[in-house]
Amino acid sequence: MKIRAYAKVNLALDVVRRREDGYHELDMIMAPIALHDLIYIDRIDHGIEITSNSYRMPTDKKNIMYQVADILIQRYNIPYGVKIHIYKHIPTQAGLAGGSADGAAVLKAMNQMFRLGLSLDQLAAIGKEVGADIPFCIYEKMALVRGIGEKLEFIQNDFHCYLLLVKPKKGVSTKKSFGMLDLNHAVHPQVLELKAGIEENNLKKVVTHLGNTLEGPSIDMVQDIQTIKEELIDLGFDGALMSGSGSCVFGMTQDKNKLDEGYEFFKNKYYFVRKTQILHEEEEKYNKS
């Protein structure tokens, strides 16, 4: 079976407060994008085997795909194992939810492969046990996301936008970014205003309210994030923001020529540069065979 694991960007990310359990309360607007990993998964007699085209990715129990596969095998008494091969296109430590997207894709693929009959809500609940972004990646719909990532309110929209993704070589550890955050002096974007801009299909309102509380500490660790943002705006992109905890930055435009011009400018300058766009419900978002 073949399945695509779609990345995401955060159009807004507000760290509201630190909770007593050590987690942070978040308000976010998350959008699925066309950039994806490609996963092949087959049934084997026993065990979990993972191979990849990327030497950076662990293939043992540290891998999110391994963890979600193991939960399904144990919980639903599946009498087989799985062999997973993944072609990684989503970079690590980028804020694009590559690992969570892979985990969500494996959950959906195994649900179909072994005829478990689990709903998306059930798959999301299982995914939440492993990673906070997995529920969003299960649904692959633009959403207002709250809590630690488990509360999703889907956004009905016709908002179309091209994105240019630019990531410097150095990544950002999510744990370190949150650890360096000073909530008393942090930027708190107006998440609901951005949501309204999406629902109104108003690009100007959307880019006006782009914001990410984690940008400050992440820029302190990787100065290229700020440089890339400035370069995107100088090139004429309507808005630019770091996604998640970084270090990937996206530039927003509805002008295909501007997207192509930006790609030519950045392609030999930084570690990872890709043209993509926000996905919509009506588009086919994953293929299985």
Image (tube, rainbow, N blue to C red):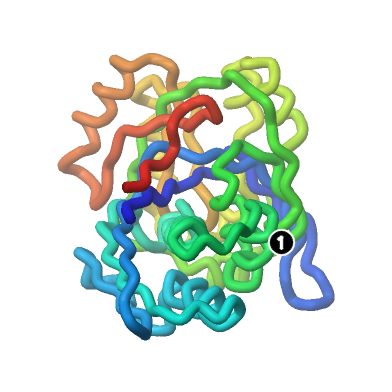
Q: Nearer the viewer, residue 62 or 68?
A: 68
The quarter in which the N terminus is drawn is bottom left
Q: Is residue 85 left or right of residue 207?
A: left
User: Callout 1: helix, strand or loop?
Assistant: loop
Residue 6 rendering spot, x and y as whole percentages: 43, 47
Q: Can the viewer see residue 229 in this picture?
A: yes
**Residue located at (79% from left, 61% from top):** 17
Q: Is residue 221 visible?
A: no
Q: Looking at this rendering, what residue extends furthest in the right direction?
A: 20
Give coordinates of residue 49: x percent, y percent: 31, 78
- x, y (%) of residue 101? 47, 56
Please tell me which residue is depicted at 62% across the width and 16% down the height of the picture. Answer: 201
Image height of 95 relative to 82, above or below: above
Q: Position of residue 44 (x, y in %)?
A: 31, 76
Q: Is residue 127 above or below residue 3?
A: below
Left or right placement of residue 258 versus residue 17 in this view: left
The disc labelled 1 sits on which kind of residue?
Ile
Residue at the outermost left position: 268
Hey, which quadrant is residue 34 in on the image?
Answer: top left
Asked whether, in this view, residue 89 is left or right of residue 119, the answer is: left
Badge 1 crowding class, 10 Å Cα cut-off, few under 14, some 14 to 19, many 20 or more, is some
Along the viewing direction, whichever of 27 and 7 lies nearer the viewer: 7
Looking at the rendering, which quadrant does residue 117 occupy?
bottom right
Please give the residue where the numbered disc 1 appears in the rendered image. Answer: 148
Task: Give the residue drawn at x 41%, y 42%.
Answer: 286
Q: Please say if 48 is above or below 231.
A: below
Question: Of residues 5 and 247, which is closer to you in this image?
Answer: 5
Q: Residue at x 30, y 74 (%)?
A: 50
- Counting labels gives 1
User: On screen, 173 above or below 80?
Assistant: above
